[in-house]
Image: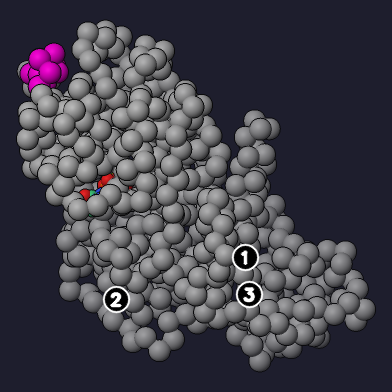
Amino acid sequence: MSDVLATNPVQSSPQSVLRDVFGYDSFRPGQEQVIQACLDGRDSLVLMPTGGGKSLCYQVPALLLPGLTLVVSPLISLMKDQVDALHASGVSAAYLTSALSRPEQLEVLAGVQDGKYKLLYVAPERLVRPEFIQRLQHIQISLFAIDEAHCVSHWGHDFRQDYMALGQLKHFFPHVPMMGLTATADPATRLDILQQLRLQQPMVHQGSFDRPNIRYTQLQKYKPLEQLESYIKGQEGSGIIYCNSRKKVEDVAFKLANRGINCAGYHAGMEAEIRDITQRNFLKDNIDVIVATVAFGMGINKPNVRYVVHHDLPRTIESYYQETGRAGRDGSPAEALLLFDEKDVARIREWISLTDNPHRQEVELQRFAAMEAFAEAQTCRRQVLLNYFGEYNASACGNCDICLDPPKAFDGTVAAQKVLSCIYRLNQSAASQYLIDVLRGKKLKRIIDSGHDQLSTYGIGKDESDAWWHNLINQLIHQGLIRVDITQHAVLKLNEAARAVLKGELPVSLAVPRMNLNLGKKAKLDNRNYDRALFAKLKKLRKSIAEEDEVPPFVVFS
Ligand code: ADP
Ligand code: MG
Ligand code: ZN
């Protein structure tokens, strides 16, 4: 088939290639326009969510154009999968990576010289080597396709040094059209890709990033382990729990496993072999839950992930979207649950303030502000998400926690006064859990030892649960009445505005705390496939792992 197309390109159209080579009836939204722009010799930037069908955008023109299409891809496994799939469709394609032996590489290079392939997949570092560029200058190149193009940007969630040099291609091959493709729609990253790749008057296609089958939900984080346990046991199918550090991954995986959940940890600090076993078992449904850092992601295509939980607040909507996007690829209902804690906000803000590049700091703050707005949204969360990507949907989605259970206001003046006066009585030196323990009049040793059971505020909050008070405290933080001092073990401090509330001069309107997701769903506990050997190994490994964030240079979390 590829030979026919190679020798007889003009008589073929995108539609016939789609039908005859790939076996599909119609293009998906955007594909045809991008393909046409490419056939017209234009540069382009293709923004489509994962699974949107980006590959065809360059594979179809590759078969219609006379020369070779070079595809840059960051992962060897992705290249191999794609080339295998092309072979299955009868297209002659190859890949060139360090995973091939020297003779194999030479064979591929000879094939390139002879015009044997329509598509060649290469790793970025190879494509910018002078001797390789020289070779390419002697053959006909029709198109450069830069897959996962966000890797070129420092703003992206997956920056690769090697991608940076791809900007040179425009210098050596000014007349060869270039197509960048990514599932990243973050505005800062998008602009950066255009600049870094030096795309010339590109056609930019932005597909919809909406994932209607994913329900977005936020839950106040206060006892994450208990919350996770009851959440997971109320779910069916597999899930991913994202944590912000390796240490936390180890910890959460270990503790959840001890609570009878069939789970395993995954992060970049683990031996490749263990990571492989874990990943394979997850794909085969032998492991229900993966607890992971962001290292668990690209290239993992498991269609039936039913939920993704964020144990910690991500720093950008972009990474949040990527990570939650791993749920519900099969189109069936799935859930994205964000455990939200005001302390995470304070820590991330602190961390961003340490950035020494002022421009970067500003951009990071803006991006984080958007993430925060999502987490604290009082209106449809999906709208907040899509607005960030430049998709302005008119109507609320009906499939997020806010749409399904809209916030109801109540007069929270008395409740607020209870909290504020208790903070005051505790000399502004208690963190939220201790404050709540005092409010609820718990008979804890540390309370009695410090004489706090004698305070007038001891026990005045008996009627409500811990979760309710945590939620309330967060609302008071949002309203600016109190703040978290992260330099001092996250103790709560009163702000100036609290005075008027305490004096009864300022009423406080609050939202009725939303709690207890999954009520009514029956717990499903499944211990059968729990891999003890793997876990013992993990336990050993755990000791040797330093606390470390996965994405340099964004480090520092406790
Ligand atoms: P992306 O790279 O955007 O994540 P892919 O290119 O891997 O997505 O495509 C995802 C899936 O959609 C693949 O199985 C692909 O064959 C399929 N697909 C792409 N375009 C079409 C189409 N026009 N009709 C039907 N299926 C398509
Ligand atoms: Mg792809
Ligand atoms: Zn909604």
Give the residue drawn at x 62%, y 65%. Answer: 376
In the displayed orientation, state which residue is furthest to the front: 11
Question: Which is more toward the observer, 36 or 23?
Answer: 36
Segment colored magenta: 107-116
**Above or below for 225 versus 199:** below
SS for dot 1: loop
Q: Nearer the viewer, residue 32 or 71?
A: 32
Q: Residues within 10 Å of mark 1 (few under 14, many from 20)?
A: some
Residue at the disc numbered 2:
236
Separation of disc 2 and disc 3 at Cα? 28 Å
Q: Amino acid at mark 1?
A: Glu
Which quadrant, please, contains the N terminus?
A: top left
Name the residue tied to disc 1: 376
Circle 3 or circle 1, nearest the eye: 1
Q: Is residue 307 placed above or below 351 in the rendered structure?
A: below
Work out whether residue 59 or residue 513 is closer to the camera in this orientation and state it: 59
131, above or below 267, in the image: above
Q: Is residue 134 left or right of residue 312?
A: left
The residue wearing badge 3 is 470
